[in-house]
Image: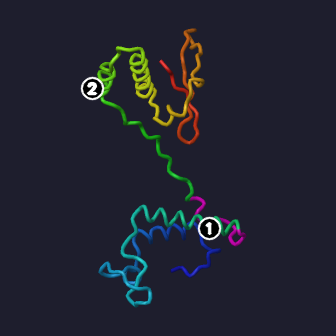
Amino acid sequence: MLNKPLSSLTHEDCLRYQRFLADPQPAATWVAGGGRKHARSDARWRPFYGPLSPASQRQAVVILNALFSWLVQAGYLAGNPLSLYRQRTRYPAPRITRYLEPGIWQEVKDTIAAVPRETEREIAHATRVRWLFTLLYLGGLRIAEVGANTMGQFFVRRDADGAMRWWLTVHGKGGKERLVPAT
């Protein structure tokens, strides 16, 4: 223990605390023996049952960071000793790995092709089903995105070669708008 007031803690003190969370020493003082839980009033009670997992260590630092930030805003601290820690690791955007295997997509297309087309109503139904599944598959759309859109969100625009191309404006997750080519 450093026996320092919060207002005197430095970034290095916080780093020392992070190392302590990974390996609380001396273990006899900080770690409960035998992995048993004891009441706080029991002399055998200890705050730890071993080193914290990496996720628990991160959570402890997040909580301390929030505490220090609040103390800065309240005027108790001049600065946050964990402010350098706030630089989060940037992870690359995840690659989309969900897709139908070509054989499964062919089964879907074959099933749609087998839909009855004897009456005008059946022809219209089969055409709508084919169009909807193609839109979902080729556009990578979620069901909610398709369900929330109207035909008014389709539009045509010339591409660089002057050819007319159809597009669909989609309002997706988080209210984000994107354009999907409607082939």
| 8 relative to 27 in the view: left or right | right
* Residue name at image x 65 percent, y 74 percent: 7
Label 1, label 2: how far apart the Cα atoms are: 56 Å
Magenta stretch encompasses residue 83:
yes
* Residue name at image x 62 percent, y 78 percent: 5
Magenta stretch encompasses residue 149:
no
Residue 87's place in the image compared with 67, above or below, is above
Q: Residue 111 is drawn in which quadrant?
A: top left
**Please, what secondary structure does the residue beneath circle 1 have?**
helix
* Residue name at image x 54 percent, y 15 percent: 165
Residue identifier under label 2: 103
Q: Which residues are magenta?
A: 74-84
Q: Main secondary structure of the magenta part?
A: loop
Three-letter code for the amino acid on which mark 2 is drawn: Gly
Residue 4's place in the image compared with 22, above or below, is below
Expressed as whole percent of the image width and height from the top left, the position of residue 130 reads 40, 21
Q: Residue 104 is drawn in which quadrant?
A: top left
Q: Give the crowd class for mark 2: few <14, some 14-19, many >=20 residues within 10 Å.
A: few
Residue 126's place in the image compared with 45, above or below, is above
Q: Residue 162 is drawn in which quadrant?
A: top right
**Please, what secondary structure does the residue beneath circle 2 have?**
helix
State which tag comes first along the sequence, 1 or 2. 1
Q: Give the crowd class for mark 1: few <14, some 14-19, many >=20 residues within 10 Å.
A: many
Residue identifier under label 1: 68
Say which of 83 and 13 sits in front. Answer: 83
Asked if the residue at tag 2 contacts the one at tag 1, i.e. Cβ–Cβ closer than 8 Å, the answer is no
Expressed as whole percent of the image width and height from the top left, the position of residue 24 reads 41, 75
